[in-house]
Each structure stands twice: as structure tokens, then as C-alpha cells.
Amino acid sequence: MRKSIMLVAASALLCSSALAQAADTKVGILMDITGPIANFIPPLQNAANLAVKQVNDQGGLLDGNAVAVYGDTTGTSQGAVDAAQKLANVENVPIVMGALMSGTTIAAAEAVFIPTGIVQLSPTATSPAMTDMKDNDLVYRIVPSDNFQGDVLAKMVLDEGINKVAVTYVNNDYGVGIGQTFMDAYRAAGGEVVAEVKHEEKKDSYRSELASLTQGGAEALVVVAYAGDSGGKIVKQAIEGGLFTRFVGTDGLRDDLLIQNVGAEALKTSFFSSPTSPADNPAQTTLHAAFNAEYGEGADKAFVDQTYDATFLTMLAIEKAGSADRAKLAAALREVASAPGEKVGPGEWSKAKQLISEGKDIDYDGAGGTYEFDANGDVRGYVGKFVVDGSSYKQIAVFE
Amino acid sequence: MIDFINFYLFPGLAIGSVYALGAVGISMIFGILRFAHFAHGDLMTVGTYGVLAAAGIIAINPLLLVPFGMALAIVVALLVDKVFYQPLRTLPTIYTVISSFGVALIFRSLVQMFWGSQNQVFNSGGVRPPLVLFDTFRISVLHVQAVLATACIAVALHFFLSRTRTGRSMRAVSDDPELAEVSGLDTEKVVRWTWIIGAALAAIAGLFVAMDTSAHPNLGWNLLMPMFAAAILGGIGKPMGAMAGGYIIGLAEELSSYHWIGNEALISPSYKTAVAFVVMIALLIVRPQGLFKGRLL
């Protein structure tokens, strides 16, 4: 008797969860919520939640609502694999937005998402290693590869009249990728790298690295690392030790935390490169207005545009595919992101849903760019030059 | 030579002080309670955030607010001991070790829940101009404070353990718990004092790290491995050994990348973590009981 009650209960439970799944569609969101880029995350979670909320307010996803399922990579490869396993095998998501760091994105893709056939769309992973990854057309990103950011950064540094630099980069996919492309491009354009040190994350003192970097009389220190970990400590300790006064950073260092850490005054001659959005983009204005209306502030924080766009694109792909069937989503993602097709922008979910139901082709042009994927799942993009302005950053030039 | 003192020796001593303060707790808990306390790093984080919370209300030098962090760490440690470790004390120690892993995760998650996962800088943070002596030595004030504080604590701890009744019973329990118990020593009191000292020192160490860099939920966890290395190197159950071990590990890490020969760093700074462990392994091969004749496990 007892057994049969258990059976009934169990089958009821199964039925109810099956029903819930038929109605709602899960979207996996993999973020580096803790770890070295933790400070970037709160506005990015808002960006992803905004995309999901807009979809649910404007007709929902497929026959039900979209449900965001978060995974935290903890900023490490091991943590990324654990979180990805959970999304793929426990939550059974059809598609994943994320991760944000290059290392965690690659680890999650190689260990989990490629073997399970899940499309992964990263808003911010910039490592060149992702371009040639054997990914069965499953791994996409909507920021330009660091081959591009490295080239632009080299140009920026030379344009500033800095001909001798010291370079330090963090020993992970992000740091090595961008560090190497920067140095190659800088040397090719006639600059001189007088000292080069690869460093490990999570140490408390980088003074010995800095002492090596001062050998050779560099005019500026190029730091390719995250402000929440080694990057911020290196800049702070360099200033405290009176070793360098001018810093050149990449997107990982362009974090408000850095300004809190060392003060705007100490960074007034420094500048930073970061993937950015095209200037005067109406789609960006729309998104920022919606974002600030919902959350009050923060629309101009780094990578809000890309995170929103990536989340929106994953849901467009599901809608386009007509089901949460993993196998159909790569083709669907390419179709909704690329021309030709009727233009759809941020927040225009009901319009997109309508067009898809009529069988028309759509082309999402987001706040961060137009996103035309090439054969490797990469996009061309924009890199901006930023300087410190008060407690945040201001863009002073855009390179295409 | 000036570079050596400014950028290698003093940072090495400063990080050594942090390892030393953390390792004392680990070593004493290992010696008296007989288990590797994996939550010690996260206990450090809890203490640090206690100071951070106080610093949000009272705007004075965070170093003066350290009693708040110590109090929080002590309360939390005693509570955790009561709830999670005490019920397991009669079982093989591996249960407690695994349980301490779980406690580490609980601590980290609680810190994330209350204070958020982002990095936080102390209000008085920002760049602190270093102490410049004779126009050549540039030494961070905080590093001097860390080294001096650790030295004072070492002296105080030594007197506590050798002169007071409680301190002597702690050493007795560490040397032979059964004998200590049959001779009528109050083991529960000894356990309590172990936690109080371990947690208080962990909070101080965490504060120094957080002020030198920034506070984040993984602060203590990242320091756990070198602290264990220091405790083992010094000899399990020997607080003074743990102190020495901390300084040896800290100095080995920093000094190994000095350009001893020629102009190149002797060992690339990216390997400095490994250096600490090589030193530990090499010493244990020669002297398995650790520097200060700790207990063999």
C-alpha cells in the first residue's frame, strides 16, 4: 500500500515537472559571480534579468515564460565546469549565455557544452584561443577577439608617443591571449617592450614582479589583468613603490574598483582599452533608457550592452527554432543575429515574436553592435579608448 | 641592494606575518583538537568583514577596529565548534576534517550573502604613501605595522603558553590528551581557548591582507595553502614553530624571485607559490617532525 502511494506521488511529481517544462523554457546564464571580476557582475545580472523580463512582459518565450537559470563559475576553470554540468545535466537548459571570462568560457565549453551539444554565447570572452576551437559550431561570442583589441591597444600606445613599455599579464587564457597579441603588434609597429613578466593571480604582493619590470626604463606599464585581482594590486603597489606613474590597461582593468583602490588622481595619465559599442547607436539609447527605468542607474557600466544583447539573442534563437531542441539552436542563432532580415532592436520582443510566427527572417541589431557571425562564431567589433573621469570612466575614441 | 630591501625583503616579511598569524591557529587546532581545520582561511575572511562592517559605521583607522573583527571571529568559531565539530569529536578525525570543509563553504557563502561578492576597499584605502627613510628606503607603513604587531603577539603568546595555567594546560593537552584528561585538566576549557586564540589571530591576519589589497569572500581561502605549509613546516602543535614557518614561507616566496645571479630573476615570479611548497617538502624530508619538533602524524 505504502509503495503504491509512493509510486503515485512520484508519478504525480514527474507529471507536474513535465507540465512546468512544457510551459516555461529555461535559459542558462553562466556568470563569474564570485572571483576576480565579481565587481563587474551586479549590473550584468540586471542586464540579463531585464532581457528575460521584457520577453515575459511581451508575450513570453514559445508557449510559456522564459526562466533564467544562473550558474556561478567562481571565476575558476574548475568552478566553471561544475556550474556548467549543473546547467547542462540538472537544469537541462537548451542554450547558455556566458561565461564572461575567457578561461571559464573555454573550460565550460570544452568540458561540458560541446560534448552535450549546447550552444554557448559569451558576451565578453575575448581570448583568441576561442577562434580556432573545435566547437562543432556551438561556441559564439559577441565581442571582438583580442587579436583585435591587442592591435588597437598597440596603436593607442604608440599614438600617445610611448615607445618603450613594460608589459605584465596574468597567466590565463585572457592575459596570455591579449598580452601576446599586444606585444607582437607593438613590436611590429616599432615599439620596444623593455620588460615582460607573466604573473599568477591571487597573490598578495606583486612587488618582486614590479621590481623586474622597472629594469629597462619603460615609459609606461601595460597591465593585462583583472582589477579585482592581480591587476588592481599591481597598479596600487607600483604607485606606492614609486615605480610607475603611467598605466595602460585593458577591459579587465577598466573597473570602477581600480579607481576606488588607488584614486582618480593617480590614474590621470593612464588610459584603457575595452570592447565598446558604436558611437551614436539608437539601439543603445533605447536599452539604456529601459535599463535605468528599471534599475535606476548602471546602464553605462562595462558590458551591460553585450550581456543584454547576448541574453536577448539566446531567447530569439529559441523562439526562431520553435522549440528547446538543442540541435536546432546554432542555426537559429545565426539566422536571428545576421542579415538579411527585418531589423529588430533591444526591447522589441513582441515585434520579433510576431515576425517569427509569420515565418519572416529577422536580424537583431543590438546595443553593442550588429553582430554578424563569421564561420568561427566571432564578430567584428569596436574597441574604445577610455580615461578616468571622476569615479568612473569616459570614452574618448572608438576604433573599428 | 636598496631594491632588495624595498621590494623583496619587506613585502616578504609582511606576507610572512600574515601566514604566521594564520598558521598559529591552524597549528594549535591541529595539535589540540587533532584535525586539519580547513575553514581557518574562511574564518579569517569572516573576521575581516567584521572589521569592514565596523569601519562602515566608525570612520577611524581600521586597525583600531580590529577588536570587532576578533570578536566576530571568536563568536563564530565557538558557535561552529559547538554545532558542527563537538558532536563529531569522538568519531575518527576525518569526519571533522570533511565537516570543516563544509563549514568553510558556509562561511564564504554567508559573507557573500551579507556583504556581496564584490571586492571592497577600506574607506581609508586608496594609495597610502610609503614611509621614506634616508631618501632610499620606501617601506609601506602597513607592512611595518604588520611585522611589529606579529612580533608583539609572538611575545605575548609565548608568555601565555609558558606562564599561565591555561596556557600550560593547552600545551599538556597538545602533548598527550589522554594523560591530560586523567590528570584532571578541563579539556573543554582548553578547546575553548584554542578557538579564541586561533580566531582572534586569524581576524588580525585577514585585516592586514584586506588593507594591503582589498576584501573579498575568497580572501582567506586563497591563503589557506601557504598557511598550512607554514604550520606543517614549523611542527604541528608548536605555535612558535608556526610563526617561524610563516616567515620562512613568506620570505621564500618573495626572495626566490630576486636577481641573485646576474640581472634575471632567479626564479620567475610566476613560480613563487611553488617555491614555498618545495621548501616545505625539502625540509620535511630532512626533518619530518618540522622545525620545532612537532608531533608526527
Image (spheres, grey):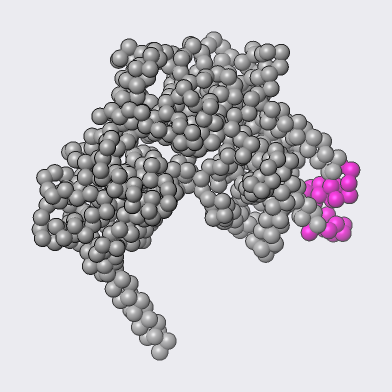
Is residue A191 part of the magenta span, yes or no?
no
Q: Position of residue B294 (x, y in %)?
A: 73, 40
Which of A243/B45 is in front? A243
Q: Is A30 displayed left or right of B108 in the figure?
A: left
Q: Is B30 displayed left or right of A173 in the figure?
A: right
Q: Quadrant of the N terminus of chain B?
A: top right
Q: Going 44% across and 43% down the picture, which residue do you hit?
A: A40
**What type of secondary structure mainly makes up the magenta span?**
helix
Q: Going 48% across and 31% down the picture, which residue do you hit?
A: A231
Q: Is residue B205 visible?
A: no
- Magenta stretch in the rendered image: B162-188
Q: Position of residue B18 (x, y in %)?
A: 67, 36
Is residue B174 part of the magenta span, yes or no?
yes
Which of A142/B168 is in front? A142
Q: Quadrant of the C terminus of chain B?
A: top right
Which of A159/B188 is in front? A159
Quarter of the figure with residue B62:
top right
Judge whether A146 appears above or below A65 on screen: above
